[in-house]
Image: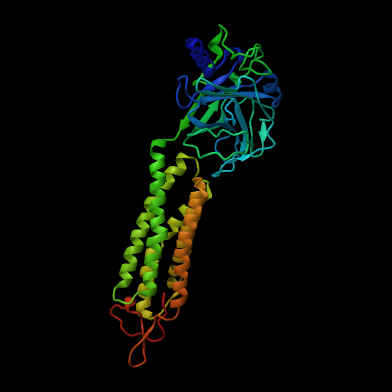
């Protein structure tokens, strides 16, 4: 009995000759691996529309498993499966990928969970018929494409266990891409009702001509090194938070409340250190974005632009300092340096919240981050307001002098010396 069950699982995972399927097990090839199989009836292949069939199967150690049409999450046609509330069958949830957030339920999808689906021997199986997978909001697919683009993902943990097709799902910890040769998934002998079971309702098994089943050779996959992703994500978040929620504001506030000679150089040192943290965080962010195909996400774009613009702050600051000492007041480079710095600091802090959203962080996590960032930046701008116009000094003769931290060899200046 055990041998028969194992043989059935292996055969259904590897592809079914009688149903002419193409299959791929991107994370392995044993009987407990996550595997996907596709079948396109000849009528659908010739007309370019109609029903197609696919099978999603994997171990019950996964919270959910998904297969999607497309090259990335944004605009993809996704099918998520997870155990139903009583564990007697699977719930099929068609969703639309909207980028870096949880896919949304797609009420326009014409999908059916077929017989043969369920949970048995620690394996979840979902046999699916899709009647409008040739086109969806965000894309389309030719049923005769020899290199069709698909994405896959799954999450480890407790089963979703819900009948709700819009149930919240945790962020995936495993994902990749697959290319299926759909020309090898079509056959006139394939069932037009359910290619994954026989007429008696049992899992289909291959005929003697099993050579038409294509595993691996008809599909290629790529995946992410998730052993590093978690630690890199945490390091990226920590480094960027230190830079934009602590060191950048600290260095800026010093320029508002300083009262000792040379504090301008302390300001410069802190900001250079902050920028080094931002560069390190950017490097980690680029690696994650490339790995997860999220370079076009707004968090990644804003982060890249912010850190790249910050590189101009050091030369602008030196020019501002030099002109401030020689002319006794702010010049055009001064205002560019000051306001660009304030804008980029604030944008970096806001982008941190976008990053938490991208990482599908909890609502409490977002609230905590927003509260801390809000206190820091509201406090920063209050300090700016309270110290505006109060940082010039007057000597006993009534002559205004540049703030102490800005003075070098020039002690007296004509005119007013405005504060930063």
Picture layout, residue 205 above or below residue 80: above
Looking at the picture, tell me which residue is in the foreground, 52 or 162. Answer: 162
Residue 275 screen position, x and y as percent: 37, 58
Choose top left, top right, bottom left or bottom right for residue 404.
bottom left
**Looking at the image, which residue sits at the far bottom?**
397
**Spot occupied by residue 409 in the image (x, y as percentages of width and height):** 28, 79
Please state, as top left, top right, bottom left or bottom right, where the C terminus lies in the image.
Answer: bottom left
Q: Position of residue 36 (x, y in %)?
A: 54, 24
Furthest residue toward front: 86
Residue 3 seen: yes
* Left or right position of 142 against 3: right
In the figure, 191 relative to 345: above or below?
above
Residue at point 50%, 43% (across, down) = 294
41, above or below 299, in the image? above
Judge by depth and name the residue closer to the eye, 364 or 77: 364
Residue 351 shows in this picture? no
247 relative to 126 in the view: left or right: left
Snapshot colouring:
rainbow
Q: Quadrant of residue 331?
A: bottom left
Count of all numbered marks drawn on residues in the image: 0
Q: Percent x, y for residue 145?
A: 60, 26
Look at 34% across and 74% down and name the residue there: 258
User: Residue at the spot x=52%, y=39% of the render?
Assistant: 170
Of the pair 51 and 129, the residue shown nearer to us: 129
Task: Answer above or below: position of 240 versus 85.
Answer: below
């Amino acid at each position: 009995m055990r041998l028969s069950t194992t043989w059935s699982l292996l055969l259904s995972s590897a592809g079914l000759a009688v149903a002419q399927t193409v299959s791929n097990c991107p994370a392995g090839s044993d009987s407990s691996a996550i595997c996907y199989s596709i079948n396109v009836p000849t009528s659908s292949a010739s007309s370019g529309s109609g029903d197609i069939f696919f099978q999603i199967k994997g171990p019950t150690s996964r919270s959910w498993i998904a297969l999607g049409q497309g090259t990335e999450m944004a605009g993809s046609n996704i099918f998520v499966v997870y155990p139903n509330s009583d564990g007697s069958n699977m719930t099929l949830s068609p969703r639309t990928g909207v980028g870096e957030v949880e896919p949304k339920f797609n009420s326009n999808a014409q999908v059916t969970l077929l017989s043969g689906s369920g949970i048995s021997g620690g394996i979840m199986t979902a046999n699916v018929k899709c009647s409008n997978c040739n086109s969806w909001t965000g894309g389309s697919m030719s049923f005769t494409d020899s290199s069709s683009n698909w994405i896959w993902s799954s999450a480890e943990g407790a089963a979703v266990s819900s009948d709700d097709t819009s149930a919240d799902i945790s962020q995936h910890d495993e994902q990749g891409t697959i290319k299926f040769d759909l020309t090898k998934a079509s056959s006139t002998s394939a069932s037009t009702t359910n290619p994954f079971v026989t007429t008696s309702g049992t899992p289909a098994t291959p005929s003697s001509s099993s050579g038409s089943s294509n595993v691996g050779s008809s599909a290629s996959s790529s995946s992410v090194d998730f052993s590093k992703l978690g630690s890199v994500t945490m390091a990226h978040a920590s480094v960027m938070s230190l830079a934009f929620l602590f060191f950048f504001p600290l260095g800026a506030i010093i320029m508002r409340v300083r009262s000792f000679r040379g504090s301008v150089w302390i300001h410069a040192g802190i900001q250079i250190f902050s920028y080094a943290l931002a560069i390190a965080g950017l490097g980690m962010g680029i690696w994650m974005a490339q790995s997860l195909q999220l370079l076009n996400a707004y968090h990644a774009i804003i982060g890249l632009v912010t850190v790249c613009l910050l590189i101009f702050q050091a030369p602008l600051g030196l020019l501002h300092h030099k002109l401030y000492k020689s002319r006794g007041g702010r010049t055009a480079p001064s205002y560019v340096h000051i306001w660009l710095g304030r804008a980029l600091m604030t944008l970096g802090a806001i982008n941190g919240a976008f990053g938490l959203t991208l990482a599908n962080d909890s609502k409490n996590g977002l609230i905590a981050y927003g509260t801390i960032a809000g206190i820091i930046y509201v406090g920063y701008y209050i300090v700016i307001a309270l110290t505006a116009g109060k940082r010039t000094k007057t000597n006993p003769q009534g002559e205004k002098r540049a703030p102490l931290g800005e003075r070098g060899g020039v002690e007296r200046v004509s005119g007013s010396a405005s504060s930063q």
